[in-house]
Each structure stands twice: as C-alpha cells, then as structure tokens.
Image (cartoon, rainbow, N blue to C red):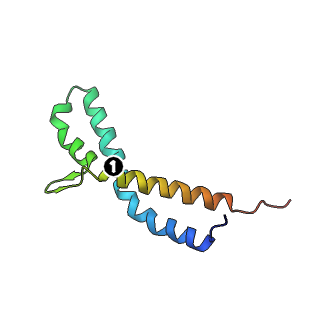
Amino acid sequence: MLINKARLRQLHRTLAPIMVFPLLLTLITGFAFQFAALNDKSSEFLWLLDLHRGKFGRIDLQMIYPFLNGLGLLTLVMTGVLMWLQIPPRRS
C-alpha cells in the first residue's frame, strides 16, 4: 500500500507542533518527580504527578491524557518512519 507523500508529510507537520507540549510536559514532570523522590522530597512535589497524569487545575484529563499522548506519539513515529522509508536510495 503506497501512501501519498504529501498527505503523510502534512499529517506529520500538523501533529508535531500540537504534540510537542504534552509530550515535553509528561517527560519533564516525570523526570522532576523521580528526581524529587531520590531526595526524599516526593511528598512536597505531588503537584508534579497531577500535571504528569493530566490534571490541570479544574481541567481533569486523567482518563484520556495518557491515551492522547500515546496515540499522538504513535502517529508521529509511524508517519516519520513511513516518510523515512519512502526516501529513494542515493546513487553513487
């Protein structure tokens, strides 16, 4: 099955800026909480876990946030790999 290169790039180009914030937020909050736990201060930084799980004050996305993060990341990986595989080999 051959996928239209233009549509594939457009999907990747559209999704990448949308997904960069939630993925970086998940990465940074998870790392920061683990670092705090190493220093026995994890109880002071439970708010990081709320952000990590998708609870943003009154906005509670804990039920769908991991699914959306995973789906977005999977889509970016798949479109990136498909674009990479469609690059014609260089002739020497």
Give the image location of residue 12, x and y in percent: 51, 65
What kind of element bears circle 1?
Answer: helix
The correct choice, above or below, for 80 with respect to 36 in the image is below
Residue shown at 35%/58% (left/top)?
21
The correct choice, above or below, for 39 with respect to 73 in the image is above
Give the image location of residue 68, x and y in percent: 36, 55
Q: Quarter-wise, where is residue 91 in the image?
A: bottom right
Is the residue marked by circle 1 packed among few (<14), some (14-19), or many (20+) residues within 10 Å?
Answer: some
Give the image location of residue 83, x and y in percent: 62, 62
Amino acid type at circle 1 is Pro
Which quadrant holds the C terminus?
bottom right
Report which residue position mark 1 lands on.
Answer: 66
Most distant residue in the right direction? 92
Give the image location of residue 57, x and y in percent: 15, 54
Residue shown at 42%/57% (left/top)?
72
The correct choice, above or below, for 8 with respect to 73 in the image is below
